[in-house]
Amino acid sequence: MKSEYFLCMFAAMLSVCMGCRPVETAQPGSQSNEQELPLRIRNAVGPDALKLAGWEINNLVSAGGKQATTDPGITRFSDLPGNISEVLSEEKIAVFPQVRVKLEAPPPLLVISRRERIVYYDRILLRPGLPDQAMAEIEDKVDALDLSSLVIQLGGFGAAYPAIVSPDMPAEHIVNAAVEEWAHQYLAFKPLGSLYLLDSLGLRQDPAVIAMNETLAGMIAREIGDKVYERYYSNAGGRVNSAGQAVFDFNKEMRETRLSADGLLAAGKIGEAEQYMKDRRLYFNQHGYAIRKLNQAYFAFHGIYGQDPGAVSPVYQDMLKLRKNCVNLSGFVDKISGMASYADLEKAAGSPAGQ
């Protein structure tokens, strides 16, 4: 069976290099527009799209062993792969593939949603180092196609090997991001992860698979990452402190924003929904949250992470039920990673003791 997952991963990566993308089923009478839209999006992005095949070859070849740098902010993480591997082994999770991490800025990700509803319609990696003005111009060009877009500065990128993690984060986030990106690579050789790869390339259309995979990787990152951080990096600082922010409940406010925006869009009030999200962005800014753009694409991206307040999927709550009934993390990971659909998760979560 493992060879089958190797083939799935190879086919998925080959499709990436060939420029495949996720597509939606066209609505009646709109097939022509649907067929033209992907090309129009890519024309809008133009040469700023990342040439993934060449970039990944360079990333792999240049990785070597430990990173050649004297930056103390990076060198203190030189043993991070080994530290993560040690904790994974203690948790009886097979360390495959080998944990490899490069601390550098990941490529930006252009996320695209419909305007009339929040949906993870498309995403395109952009060239690293693009200036802010260039990214804003790309968003404007895509928005002109009657779409909603947002360029995301990623904290981590696991579709590359070694995984790429931004060094411009608190130490706790760096550790967790490194674990999460490795988790994506690990899951790629499991049924759930291989389906996620195929789904993300347009070969299978199931948003719940995306949410399950991202949520599971996030849960692995939290449990393993916290142990790695506390054991090896807590003395270096970087623990995210939420004290003093209790007066403003970000999660509650963001979830309210998502639900209200969904309601307006469902009623066909697209303009009102977009103005509402702009007003709410200013509200978050006033409370210290530097959100650059709050729109359908923002929620499309954050909505695939079940733990995120911008998500509306029941995936995370179902996974929490199963996690509470699993004695150890490895058993939980084995159970979820072997699933092939949300129906599998829903059935397991609804069974006595999660069986």
Image (cartoon, rainbow, N blue to C red):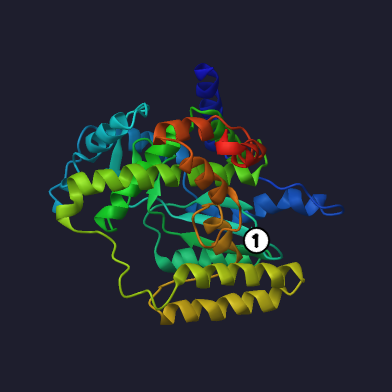
**For this rendering, which residue is in front, 142 or 251?**
251
Residue at (60% x, 52% y) in the render: 314
Could you say where residue 82 lies in the image, as x and y percent from the top left?
23, 34
Looking at the picture, which amino acid does disc 1 mark?
Ile
Could you say where residue 268 lies in the image, as x and y percent from the top left?
77, 71
Residue at (50% x, 47% y) in the render: 320
For disc 1, the marked residue is 118
**For this rendering, which residue is in front, 199 or 175?**
175
Tally the marks: 1
Residue at (40% x, 73% y) in the render: 290
Left or right of 113 on screen, residue 55: left
Could you say where residue 303 lies in the image, as x and y percent from the top left?
56, 56
Q: Quadrant of the C terminus?
A: top right
Residue 21 appears anywhere in the view: no
Mark 1 is surrounded, within 10 Å at the Cα level, by few (under 14), some (14 to 19) or many (20 or more) other residues, namely many
Say above or below: 94 vs 3: below
